[in-house]
Image: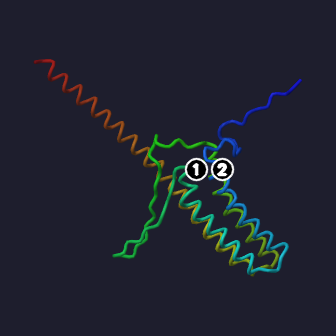
Amino acid sequence: MEQPQSQPTAGSLSWRLSSHPITLLTFLAFRVSSLLVYLFGVIFTDNMVLIFIITILLLAADFYYLKNIAGRRLVGLRWWNEVDPSTGDSQWVFESSEPGTKIINPTDSRFFWLALYSQPILWVALAILAIIRLKFIWLPLVAIALALTITNTLAFSRCDKFSQASNIAGSALYSGNLAGNIASNLAGRLFTFGR
């Protein structure tokens, strides 16, 4: 007798449930490839320059792709940094899709946040490993990787908090406007009822 196959549920870690599978797989490929190239270089080769260049290029591509494409398509979030030319002050700008305009797939969201938070943790572990193995020459590469991944992690975390706060404020404003409309209609009817 044939056993029925269970279908994965929404939000489970199966790329087949993704709304944007090509975006998701590209995002994960950039995230994993920089780690694998670094590990390959540390374990199997003495050609540090080649590994350094390839890893930096993969990290830069990951940073750009995550910031401008994957974040927007997978979770509806985007951030950038603006500099005021008159004062020279730097300001982070956060953008999120309007509530109700984009439905976020739970699988995409889960993959996105898991990959976003695990990447800096893995680079910290690799930094500790380089220190323990006395391979200090690899630490600048790990420091660059940490700077790029932590920047994206912090920015998307703030962007998500900003988005949630905006949604709460928007719904409160909308419900306040709704209550105001009901009250004005009720008052208007009371005053016209007596005529």
Residue 89 vs 156, above or below: the answer is: below
Residue 134 vs 184, above or below: the answer is: below
Image quadrant assignment for residue 60:
bottom right
Q: Amino acid at mark 1?
A: Leu
Q: Secondary structure at mark 1?
A: helix
Question: Disc 2, disc 1: CB below 8 Å?
Answer: yes
Which label belongs to residue 98? none
Comparing labels 2 and 1, the label whose residue is closer to the camera:
1
Identify the residue position indicated by label 1 in the image.
74
Residue 72 vs 181, above or below: the answer is: below
Q: Residue at x 37, y 72 (%)?
A: 84
Farthest left residue in view: 195
Identify the residue position indicated by label 2 in the image.
111
User: Viewer-proximal residue, 139 or 74?
Assistant: 74
How far apart marks 2 and 1 lie (CA) works out to: 9 Å
**Pointer 2 local density, CA inside 10 Å: few below 14, some 14–19, many at least 20:** many
In the rendered image, residue 43, in percent from the top left (x then y), is placed at 84, 72
User: Viewer-proximal residue, 111 or 158?
Assistant: 111
Q: Quadrant of the N terminus?
A: top right
Q: Amino acid at mark 2?
A: Phe
Image quadrant assignment for residue 134:
bottom right
Q: Earlier in the sequence, mark 2 or mark 1?
A: 1
Q: Relative to residue 74, is residue 164 drawn left or right?
A: left
How many dots with numbers? 2
Q: Quadrant of the C terminus?
A: top left
Farthest top residue in view: 194
Q: Secondary structure at mark 2?
A: helix
In the rendered image, residue 153, in percent from the top left (x then y), is placed at 59, 60
Q: Relative to residue 191, is residue 34 drawn left or right?
A: right
Q: Relative to residue 163, is residue 49 drawn left or right?
A: right
Q: Residue at x 46, y 58 (%)?
A: 94
